[in-house]
Image (spheres, rainbow, N blue to C red):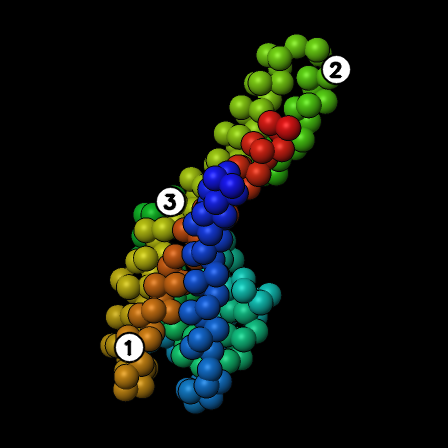
Amino acid sequence: MLYLLVAVLFVAIIIGPALWVRRVMRRYAKPQDRYSGTGAALAEHLLGQEGIEGVGVERTGEGADHYDPTSRTVRLSPSNYDGHSLTAISVAAHEVGHAVQHHAGFKPLMLRSKLVVALAPLERAGAAMLFMAPIIGAVTRSPAPTLLTVLAGFLVLGSSIVVHLVTLPTEIDASFGRALPMLKKHNILHAGDEPHARRILRAAAWTYAAAALVSLFNIARWWAILRR
């Protein structure tokens, strides 16, 4: 019973933040006609107001809002690209905040971009290593190669957590050092919306913290599999 309670608590800690982020985004996605302009229109407006040229605004998959520093593109999910809700406006401002960071040479963003490029292939390799570890042990009949493969696999999988944690300061700055000041400076928000926009921007900033916890859960899952 104790093990079950610990497992439930562990899952709650890991999954809880991601559920909270989704709940906040859904809550302020209504009313859908809160603002006259769309998230995409706001993104283009803010980029122009901030004097940033050469940054595109594109539609992407649902829940995949991000700024791509390689192509210099703000990408918004359909509900935020075409939406008129407070969520659409706030998320668009957050992603433009990353474009502003890039334009200003914000060092944490630059570091994060380099880590993503360097470590993305390794994450896939880490899962492959853990999958192959029992096979290597069966073939070599020696614990040393198996242990080395497992250790390497866990270290590689852990690199994704490092990326997410390095990303967190960048996300917080994009929300509260860039997006919120822009929304206030350009008088975008309706009366009474600022506290709610803060909640959305906080959720947007903590998306990667939630992703780091999910990565941790993935490592724990592999550990449980290998211990069987």
The answer to whether 226 appears left or right of 22 in the picture is right
Q: Quarter-wise, where is residue 58 in the image?
A: bottom right
According to the picture, the residue beneath numbered tag 3 turns out to be 166
Residue labelled with disc 2: 139
CA gap, disc 3 and disc 1? 27 Å
Q: Residue at x 41, y 51 (%)?
A: 209
Q: Is residue 25 above or below residue 83?
A: above
Residue at 34%, 74% (x, y): give it: 197
The answer to whether any part of residue 47 appears in the image is no
| Residue found farthest to the right | 139
Q: Residue at label 1? A: 194
The answer, for residue 139, to whether it is visible in the render is: yes
Nearer to us of marks 2 and 3 is 2
Helix, strand or loop at label 1? It is: helix
Q: Position of residue 30 (x, y in %)?
A: 46, 82
Q: Of 162 and 76, which appears nearest the observer?
A: 162
Label whose residue precedes the other's in the sequence (2 or 3): 2
Q: Mark 2: which amino acid?
A: Val
Mark 1 vs mark 2, CA separation in Å: 62 Å
Amino acid at circle 3: Val
